[in-house]
Image (spheres, rainbow, N blue to C red):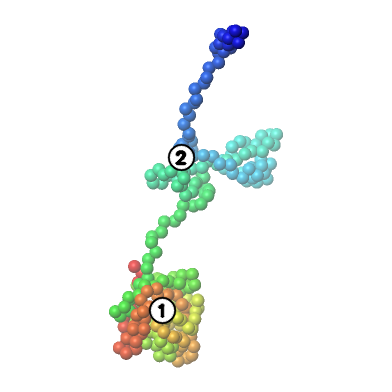
Amino acid sequence: MSRYLLVLLLIASPAAAQVKIAPKANTAHPDPCAPIGRTADGKLVYSMEMRDPAGALRAAAGGAEGSTHAGRRARAGGAAEWHFRLVLRPQVGPRAPCAKLSGMLFAGNDPVGPRPPTQRDEMSKLVIRAGDFTFDARFEEQLAPKTVAAFRKALPFESHIIHVRWSGEGVWMPLGDLDFGVGYENHTSYPAPGQIILYPGGISETEILLAYGGVHFASKMGQLAGNHFITLTSGLENLATLGKSVLWKGALPIRFEEV
């Protein structure tokens, strides 16, 4: 009986009447992409980030140059200042999820994090047409960057190929005193079949040679070396046919172009 009386007293107690179960707050998560304000010139601000607090301490002591955006001024008591900068989201194109942003900008164009990747067109393909044959090829940009850059300026490049006289199984383009403005670079006297070399001139005239078989690059003055700057990537099965056609039938037109 006493147990029931105790329960009734607790229910009737004024303190119990004052206790209310608070409903669970229905707070939405803040949008991480939403701006938190604007700068004086109207740029949207998305967050604030601490920058070099150690530098801020030195600036407060008068020893180093401080940030252009300071959180607090140094006080007479010598208290250190914490410096911050305003992080701006690049305002380009349609709004994209924050996770896909490739970089951020500080107010004042101070870059933070990785820069957005440079937009580049698809890499063009080097195509060589010699007589009735077409070959895909690549520039040896890592091994002979200066020679590649100089030859690219001359594209599309047209000439005629004739068979070599002293170098073995290859065809070449005699170019007289044409000056590409390069010296020796990734040079060799023994290009493999499908490799193209540029002799920049000097002992002999300027020339470009394409090997279709065994080559020991030379002239009537002796052994030479040329810059290996192009390698064929397709049509290698037709190289020997091309070389023998030039040997027995004479000169053929050749054209280099990027497509």
Q: Nearer the viewer, residue 126 or 241?
A: 241
The residue tagged 1 is: 194
Residue reaching furthest to the right: 77
Task: Estimate the x, y position of residue 246 in percent, counting from the top left.
Answer: 33, 86
The amino acid type of the residue labelled 2 equals Cys
What SS does tag 2 mark?
A: loop
27 over 102 or under it: above or below: above
When asked about the image quadrant of residue 147, the answer is bottom left
The answer to whether residue 44 of the structure is visible from this angle is no
Task: Estimate the x, y position of residue 180 in percent, counting from the top left.
Answer: 43, 76
Q: Nearer the viewer, residue 90 or 139?
A: 139
As measured in the structure, the alpha-carbon distance from the residue carrying label 2 to the one carrying label 1 is 54 Å
The amino acid type of the residue labelled 1 equals Gly
129 over 95 or under it: above or below: below
Residue reaching furthest to the front: 1
Direction from residue 255 to residue 28 in the image, left or right: right
Circle 2 or circle 1, nearest the eye: 1
Please tell me which residue is depicted at 40% across the width and 75% down the height of the picture: 232
